[in-house]
Amino acid sequence: MTLEDARRLLRYDHWANREVVRALRAARQPPPHAVQRLAHVVAAERLWLDRLLRQPQRLPVWPELSVEQSGALVEEMAWAWDGYLGELTAARLGEPVAYTNSKGQPWVNAVADVLHHVVMHSAYHRGQIAGDLRAAGHEPAYTDYIEAVRRGHVDDVRGET
C-alpha cells in the first residue's frame, strides 16, 4: 500500500459511510440492527485511529448512537483521518503499532495493515447494513468502491474522475 492508496481508500470509506447515513435517514424508521452496525463502524474507526495515535480509546466498540449521532461521527472521522494521513509519511506505513484488542490481547501490526483493516471492516458492516435495509423493504446505499470513483469521490488512478 502506498500513501496515496491509503488516502484514496479512506476518501472512499468516508463517502460510503456518508451514503449509508443518507440511506438510513431516508428509511425514516431504519432497522435497529442497521443503526447499531453504523454506530459500530464509526466507533471502530475512532478506536483504530486512537490506536494509531497511541491515545486512549474514546468510545465503546458498540456504542448506542442514533443515526444523527453516527452521521456526525462520520463527518468528524473524515476530518480526523485527513489530519492523520496529512501527517503520515510513506516510510511510516510499515511502522509497527502496538495495541491491546477488545479481548485484552496484545498485538502489533503495521500502520498500512491497520488502514487496510479499517476500510475492509467498514465495508463488511456496510454490506450487512444493506442487507438489513433490503430485508426491511428499504433501499440500501450503493457503496461499491468503483461507484465512488465513477462519481468523482475518489480520484481515478489515471488522473480522471
Image (spheres, rainbow, N blue to C red):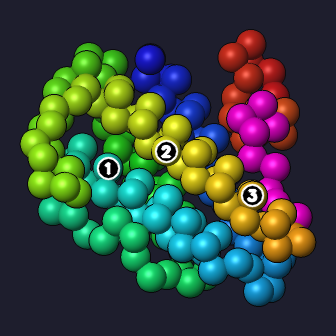
Residue 68 percent across, percent down from the top left: 60, 82
Q: Which residue is mark 1?
A: 48
| Residue drawn 81% across the image and 37% down it | 147
Q: Tag on residue 62?
A: none
Q: What crowding class fits label 2: few (fewer than 14 Cα within 10 Å), some (14-19), or many (20 or more)?
A: some
Residue 108 percent across, percent down from the top left: 16, 32
Circle nearer the N terminus (1, 2): 1
Local SS, label 1: helix
Residue sitting nearer the eye, 16 or 76: 16
State the extent of the magenta-drawn residues as a range: 139-147
| Residue drawn 61% across the image and 73% down it | 33
> Is 70 above or below relative to 19?
below
The N terminus sits in image quarter: top left
Residue 60 forms part of the magenta stretch: no
Residue 140 forms part of the magenta stretch: yes
Q: CA distance from mark 1 to mark 3?
A: 23 Å
Circle nearer the N terminus (3, 2): 2
Q: Tag on residue 121?
A: 2
| Residue drawn 80% across the image and 85% down it | 28
Disc 3 residue type?
A: Ala
Q: Which residue is mark 3?
A: 130
Q: What crowding class fits label 3: few (fewer than 14 Cα within 10 Å), some (14-19), or many (20 or more)?
A: many
- Nearest to viewer (mark 1 / mark 3): 3
| Residue drawn 82% across the image and 78% down it | 27
> Is 112 above or below relative to 68?
above
> Is 4 above or below relative to 59?
above
Residue lying farthest front? 135
